[in-house]
Image (spheres, coloured by chain):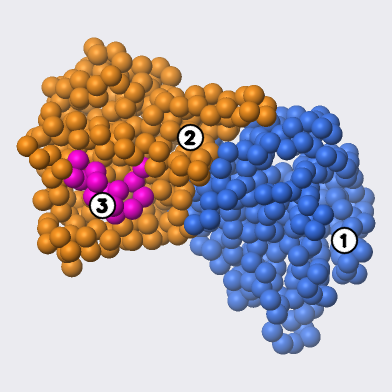
Amino acid sequence: MTDLQTQIGDISIRSPLILAAGVLGTSFSSIKRVYNNGFGAMVSKSIGIKPNAGYVNPTIFLLPETRSAMNAVGLANPGVEDFFEKMKPNLEEKLPIIYSIYGNEEEQIRAIIEKLNQLNPLAYELNVSCPHGGKFGLSVLHDDELFRSLVTTAKKYATCPVWVKLSPNAVNITDYAEIAISSGADAIVAINTLKAMVIDIETMTPVLANKAGGLSGKAIKPIGVRAVYDLYSRFPKTPIIGVGGIETAEDVIEYLLAGASAVEIGTAFAYTDDQEKLGTQINSELESYLKDKGLKLEELIGKAHKE
Amino acid sequence: MNTKGLGRPIIREIVKIVEETELTKTFYFNGEGLFAKPGQFYMLWLPEIDEKPISACITNIEEGFIGLSIKKVGRFTEEIQQRKIGDKVGIRGPFGKGFNHEKGRKAIFIAGGIGIAPIRSIFDLLKKEQEELVLIYGAQTDSDLVFKEYFTQFTNNVTYCTDDGSFGYHGFPTDILRNFLEKEIKKGGELNYSIYGCGSELFLKAVLDLIASIDQSLLTHTQLSLADRYMRCGVGLCGSCIIDDTGLSVCKDGPVFTGEILAKTTDFGIYGRNPDGSKSKIQPHY
């Protein structure tokens, strides 16, 4: 059997497939179910300091014509105290869980991290790029000073690596990565959903209750691949986790070639009849590809960069 | 996988409204592209108001329409009940796995309150294919019983129950189910029944506990719809409707689950999920 293990800085995971934030990640039982289907690690739903009910529905719907999805859930989460209790089983089970966290004040980030440190996280993923998170979303990324201070704070209190998830809604995503990396980020996650809107032409109303939301899925894959490629060109020593439109082993390979050390998968869970097999299926296709090419997984990383 | 019906809301005009009871109306729509299997559900969108899961109820492929029976229970359902013929709503779906028709077994349907809506969908399928149909249907009071005259056209074995004794048996449907199964056991032989149920979750829990106490082997042949739960995406993506400890999504892996699966969960009949993902004790309601 070919080894699919991959290294993200000091962390090693058994497969490059990671469950993306916002998908099936509020409950320990669903996170465990994803691990049991071959994933290397799972990112939780983004957790804030207080409970947040999110927006009223419609908050999510699919666009099957492009195998994509629209969402404006609005960072719904039970708050760090409740979530901590729900995740306690992992003190025994020790699954590789990355906690996605958000906040717009240093104090919030400190309090969340001090609480979740007790769960021995694999890493934190700092979400500063939710396109429908209001004052907790993209506006954090677009405030350089705030952004820098939140990454610095996360690094100061975290007992594990801190990853920063960036948005494709940027003139140049690598400029944001520069701020994150110079503030201590251990890895960059790219990309979050792309700000978007769908209008119903019969009722002449935007479909999402929040009107605008984030586009995920196949439609954004080339945007994600390009972002990872640019990040790898500028920061070849910083691990990159690629996200956006990954459904198959071919998609994973494309991201690895662009420079990703691992990938996150989300929307694909809506486009499979058998969620139990998504991870194992992609893993086995990756193994076949590596065997055919006579390559190790780590040799694929950044291989599309020729000079 | 087939992605038909998984997309954005389809806008349909209300073509007919039937006032079933004081609190329940059935809304009819052109069914093209929306026909559901029994037990599946839709996300019904009232633009600028909200979107909620509503069980498939009447599916008439020959005549090309669907009917959704909706009881006034809160802001959203009050809002839709004010809609008139010609008004437009959005419909996504159908979603989820419905009831599995177990051929060769006799059918018992058990419903509480507006839980009769998905039960009618599986009743309608089975009434074409088999003769022996047992329906046990309870509500708080006579005026809450929907489709009363309809069911008796197809089977003599219907028992209506009301909590207040205003119609039919004065008591709970579970009393009737217990008596029925115990009588069958006395007759001897195997309990060759499939049980299809829907209603409030506390009611369904009582149904499941009863069945488990009578014959554990019936649990795999018991199918209960949890369409009453909070849902968002309908496609197994957001995790808003996960039932612990299974990790299963009500919207994609359900809303119909076998008694065997439900008996293993730690949430069923005890905890419901809130929009923020936290859990609360399930409160009694019909």
The range drawn in magenta is A245-258
- Tell me the residue that label 3 is attached to: A40
Q: Is residue A252 magenta?
A: yes
Q: Amino acid at mark 2?
A: Met
Q: Secondary structure at mark 2?
A: strand
Chain identifier, colour orange: A
Q: Secondary structure at mark 3?
A: loop
Quarter of the image for residue B16 reads top right
Chain identifier, colour blue: B
Across and down, in percent, residue B107 comes to 75, 71
Q: Using the image, determine if residue A52 lies above or below residue A27.
A: above
Q: Is residue B92 visible?
A: yes
- Tell me the residue that label 1 is attached to: B151
Q: Nearer the viewer, mark 3 or mark 2?
A: 2
Q: Which chain is mark 3 on?
A: A
Q: Nearer the viewer, residue B132 or A251?
A: A251
Q: Amino acid at mark 3?
A: Gly
Q: Secondary structure at mark 1?
A: helix
Q: Which chain is mark 1 on?
A: B
Label 1 to label 2: alpha-carbon separation: 41 Å
Label 3 to label 2: alpha-carbon separation: 26 Å
